Image (tube, grey):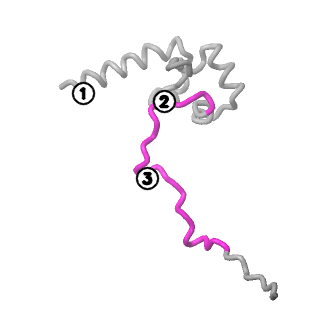
Amino acid sequence: MSTRTEPVATADRRTAAPVPTRSDPTPTPALVRRRAAARMVGMGLSTFDRADVAGLVPAGRWVRGCKLWSVAELEAWADHGCPDRKTWAPIWAAMLTGRRTTQRK
């Protein structure tokens, strides 16, 4: 009985699966959990939790026992310079009102 070993084929980097990019058709989620929300705004998880309790990040919404953050709101919040929640809430409400008015026409 011969015990020849065949060389193990390695994946060629040129034929490997492409890395997903923003241009991929995969939809971005509308809501994310706290770990993803913290990552989106560049904070660690415990720092994000403290900022949430202190009212320094947009409010999350409870959906079926899970606290979720709006991706669109987090992106807009960052674009507006990361104001505290008290300052941010009316800005976001005005943005939503304007968006709804535009969509109805």
The residue nearer to you, when weighing 105 against 20, is: 20
Amino acid carrying label 2: it is: Leu
Amino acid carrying label 1: it is: Gln
In the rendered image, which residue does mark 1 sit on? 103
Q: Mark 3 to mark 2: distance in Å?
A: 19 Å
Q: Mark 3 to mark 1: distance in Å?
A: 26 Å
Q: SS class of the residue under badge 1? A: helix
Q: Which label belongs to residue 64?
A: none
The residue nearer to you, when weighing 70 against 87, is: 70
Residue at coordinates 52% horizontally, 11% vertically from top-left?
A: 86
Is 22 in the magenta? yes
Q: Quadrant of residue 5?
A: bottom right
Q: Is residue 43 left or right of residue 86?
A: right
Q: Residues within 10 Å of mark 3 (few under 14, many from 20)?
A: few
Tell me the mark number nearer the camera, choosing from 2 and 1: 2
User: Up-down: is 74 above or below 87?
Assistant: below
- Give the magenta part as a residue range: 10-35
In the rendered image, which quarter contains the C terminus? top left
Q: Position of residue 22 (x, y in %)?
A: 46, 49
Amino acid carrying label 3: it is: Asp
Q: Position of residue 70 (x, y in %)?
A: 48, 27
Residue at coordinates 69% horizontally, 19% vertically from top-left?
A: 50
Q: Is residue 18 left or right of residue 96?
A: right
Tell me the mark number nearer the camera, choosing from 3 and 1: 3
Q: SS class of the residue under badge 2? A: strand
In the rendered image, which residue does mark 3 sit on? 24
Is 81 in the magenta? no
Residue ranking furthest to the bottom: 2
Residue at coordinates 57% horizontally, 67% vertically from top-left?
A: 16
Q: Which label belongs to residue 31?
A: 2
